[in-house]
Image: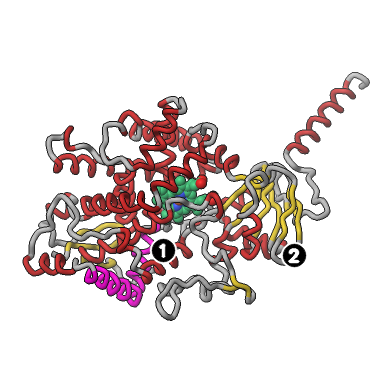
Amino acid sequence: MGFLLPILIALLASVLGGLYLLGAFRQRRPGEPPLDRGPLPWLGHVLEFRRDTAKFLERMKRKHGDIFTVQLGGYYFTFLMDPLSFGAVVKEPRTNLDFTKFAEQLVKKVFGYHPMENDHKFLQASSNKHLMGDGLVVLTQAMMTNLQNLMLQSKETRENNQKTWNEDGLFHYSYNIVFRAGYLSLFGNETPKSTESLEKAIDIDRKKSQELFYEFRKYDQLFPRLAYGVLPPGKKREAERLKRLFWNMLSVHKLKTRENVSGWVREQQQEREEHGMEEFMQDRFMFLLLWASQGNTGPAAFWLLLYLMKHPDAMRAVQQEAEKVLKETGQEEAEKVLKETGQEVKHGGPLVDLTRDMLLKTPILDSAVEETLRLTVAPVLTRAVLKDMSLKLADGNEYWLREGDRVAMFPYTAVQMDPDVHQDPLTFKYDRFLTADGAKKTDFYTGGIKLKYYNMPWGAGHTMCPGRFFATNELKQFVFLVLIYFDFELKNPDEKIPDIDVTRWGFGSMQPTKDVQFKYRLKF
Ligand code: HEM
């Protein structure tokens, strides 16, 4: 017995030590937010959180109020649910609340990418230069050309003599076209020098971007479970295979043979090369850029088009605005001539040109886009707590946060769906973000107090999406072109708008639980 006792004590100590490390003994300290460790050691609430994040956070809010700390997979997350207090997190210096540490772990796991020093600063500098201002003019132009090359010149439309109806799933069609056009605009085109003719080069672009989209969708479907680290072994192997495929398809070696590569992609690749990053790691970075730029806009394009199709008043208003913009720029003539002469839509360059400046004159479509994003974009915005600190909320209460924890906001539940802020929040109102005289509306209130953060599909603060202007233009260009060039309708006009797939909360644009069939044909 004397011999067993030390072993038993050591065993007990290691069990207790293990439980301690698993966070099982954490107690709420004075001044900290309410603590809810959850039913399982270490995992905490992660199963319920993953099953339906929005539902879980609503339950926690009802139980604890506007701020609470929950355990999720070994980390303690303090969720802030009061949008009036979001500024306290967003404006906190990076030395206290930081995004990069959290993001670095995620990109290692999901893309196999190991960032270099100052990686995030390079990303931001390059994004500010190439996704905004003058850079955006070039990119918008490239998008216009690529969209039209894909939408008007597809094999199907050509072979069908352009006049017969084509059928597709609206989600598949929108995601496919916007993904491929966005990819070609950022990662460049096949060069005609290598293919003898522009015609052939465009055909190769079409074919290869199709292959890329096909594989991307497979990864897309695995993504939420991959990010949470809960993929079963077979799917894990599939994710590994796909990762390697993308590293290869997007490799720097191949990139260097392409033309029209955007400044955003080219410059970031060159910077990494100059800083001595190995080429295989640069290939992985290309995959990260593809993901960041293409995972959200396609699904958003689907929701936008579907909401417009299901709301004829909204569709009419957007259509009239589009016609007005074309008229003001003398381009309705091009459309008229095409219609009257029955001329075929010609290859090699846009017929209708929508520049960035024209896209600035569409407040109705802007409002419809913002309303779509309010209803369907739901990121969890997370920061790592780098040192013990306090957070002062709008109601004057102050809470202590511990170093090593995380702070998170889920604006979808906290503000985008709040009936106090957005009346009748589940309904699509295309003019919700318009004032009575047709300008952009920015006055939204909660409890009589004006909100700064009333819709947050792009996040906020120093990690706010730098692609938001380009993404908005992509959505608007896509809708414009569909309206100008196609007759289109739902196969079953009475079909309900599908539910959101709740397993994807937290990753940006939501996807539907099922597709909606539609048909389309060229107008002329
Ligand atoms: C509808 C389309 C899009 C949505 C809803 C969206 C949403 C978001 C959100 C919510 C974040 C920030 C997350 C956070 O703070 O944690 C983000 C970050 C980012 N987005 Fe977007 N995005 C879209 C399109 C794009 C496009 C088209 C590009 C590039 C061309 C892009 C590039 C990026 C990059 C590089 C970041 C990381 C920023 C950083 O870490 O500083 N996004 N996006």
As shown in the figure, which amino acid type bears the numbered disc 1?
Pro
Q: Which mark is residue 475?
A: none
The residue at 47%/41% (across/down) is 123
Label 1 Cα crowd, 10 Å radius (few <14 / some 14-19 / many 20+): some
Above or below — where is 149 with respect to 234?
Answer: below
Query: Which residue is labeled 2 in the image?
Result: 396
Dot 2, how many residues are within 10 Å of its Cα: few (below 14), some (14-19), or many (20+)?
few
Amino acid under disc 2: Gly
Location of the C terminus (image quadrant): bottom left
Left or right for 403, reference 172: right
Query: What residue is at 14 percent from the left and 61 percent from the top?
Result: 164
Q: Which residues are magenta?
A: 299-328
Q: Is residue 132 left or right of residue 20?
A: left
Determine if the magenta segment contains residue 326: yes
Kindly tell me whether residue 452 is visible in this rendering. yes
Q: Residue at x 26, y 62 (%)?
A: 482
Mark 2 CB near ligand 1 (8 Å cut) = no
Rendering coords of residue 468 (x, y %): 43, 55
- Magenta segment main secondary structure: helix
Q: Is residue 355 magenta?
A: no
Q: Badge 1 is on which residue? A: 498
Q: Which marked residue is nearer to the observer: mark 1 or mark 2?
A: 2
